[in-house]
Amino acid sequence: MLRNMKSPYWPLHLMLLPGLILVLIYSYGPMVGIVIAFQKFMPAKGGLFASDWAGLDNFRYVLDMPDSMRVLKNTILIAMFKIVVGLMVPITVALLLNEVRKELFKRGVQTLIYLPHFLSWIILGGILIDILSPSSGIVNQFLGLFGIESIYFLGDNSWFRPVLVLSDVWKEFGFNTIVYLAALTGINPALYEAAIVDGAGRWKQTLNVTLPGMMPIIVLTMTLALGNVLNAGFDQVFNLYSPQVYESGDIIDTFVYRIGLVDAQYGVATAVGLFKSVVSFTFITASYYLAYRFANYRIF
């Protein structure tokens, strides 16, 4: 023990201790509540272990619900579109900004596209509701100039998913762009010089130098994103959806919210949440394996 305390790294380990305690209390401690998924939970009976056991009845009940498959489909579709578009847009913007030579303009653009990241979905939801209003929204007023009838973007099932995906990308692509710009600074300039000597233009340099140099961070963001394939964004959907768009916009998290907090079916809601966590864990485990297998990426 004393020999370990002489290590130059023990102060750093002590610095991790408060964060580790918080994680244990707020992340691992509440996992005891998983037991509710296997009970007919009645808060009036007292503690977590006072209710009657139900075995797998809550899971069977969820699978038999007519809305369960629709909710799962919506969650996967919305999440996958967010992952794909949310990956392509910041990479493209980072490559474009990397070609800008005027630093003042470049930094100004970075600041503008980064600002929405700091706004909550409560604020952005209100902004989007006003902008997309079918009667007074600026988008529909603009469409009216071309003789196009007003579109109820947040109340039409054919438009609600695209609105969710595009608004999420608008909020987050600025942050991801900065991540990719940081990756670009780590590329050896000598590689570009060698490419120019070989006669490569800007497009060839991008394909053969820039993108391969960004590949480790791209693989990392893809790997982390796959772990969130069942997280379609509760805050965003909850602030924008309505019963009119349940068919296309209801996701697992909002489904759990209504079952657990509105209908007070705590056992069923916990069962759905546990199912989601297990599937998400499976996805992120598979994504880390694929990242190691095809890109030689490892965390440890």
Image (cartoon, rainbow, N blue to C red):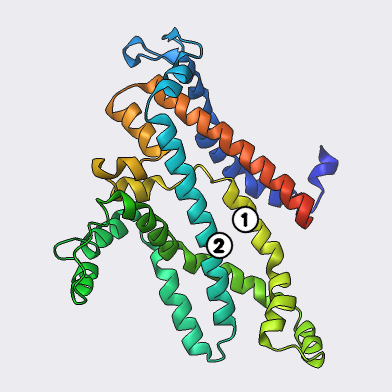
Question: Residue 124 sits in which quadrant?
Answer: bottom left
Residue at 67 percent across and 87 percent down: it is: 202
State the image coordinates of residue 226 (x, y, percent, origin top left): 59, 48
Contact between labelled residues 2 and 1, with CB atoms less than 8 Å apart: yes
How far across and how far down the image is residue 109, in percent? 45, 80
Q: Nearer the viewer, residue 70 or 262?
A: 70
In the rendered structure, find residue 137 and report the number of the disc placed on it. Answer: none
Q: On the image, which quarter does residue 258 sit in?
A: top left
**Which one is in front, 41 or 61?**
61
Q: Nearer the viewer, residue 291 or 199?
A: 199
The type of residue carrying mark 1 is Met
Name the residue located 15 percent from the left edge and 65 percent from the top edge: 136
Q: Position of residue 135 (x, y in %)?
A: 14, 62
- Mark closer to the chain start, 1 or 2: 2
Task: Please say whether residue 44 is visible from this viewpoint.
Answer: yes
Rendered residue at 48%/77% (across/down): 110
Disc 2: which residue: 87
Task: Report the residue that reaches farthest toward the right.
Answer: 3
What residue type is disc 2 on? Leu
Residue 76, image x and y in percent?
49, 44
Q: Give the residue at mark 1.
A: 222
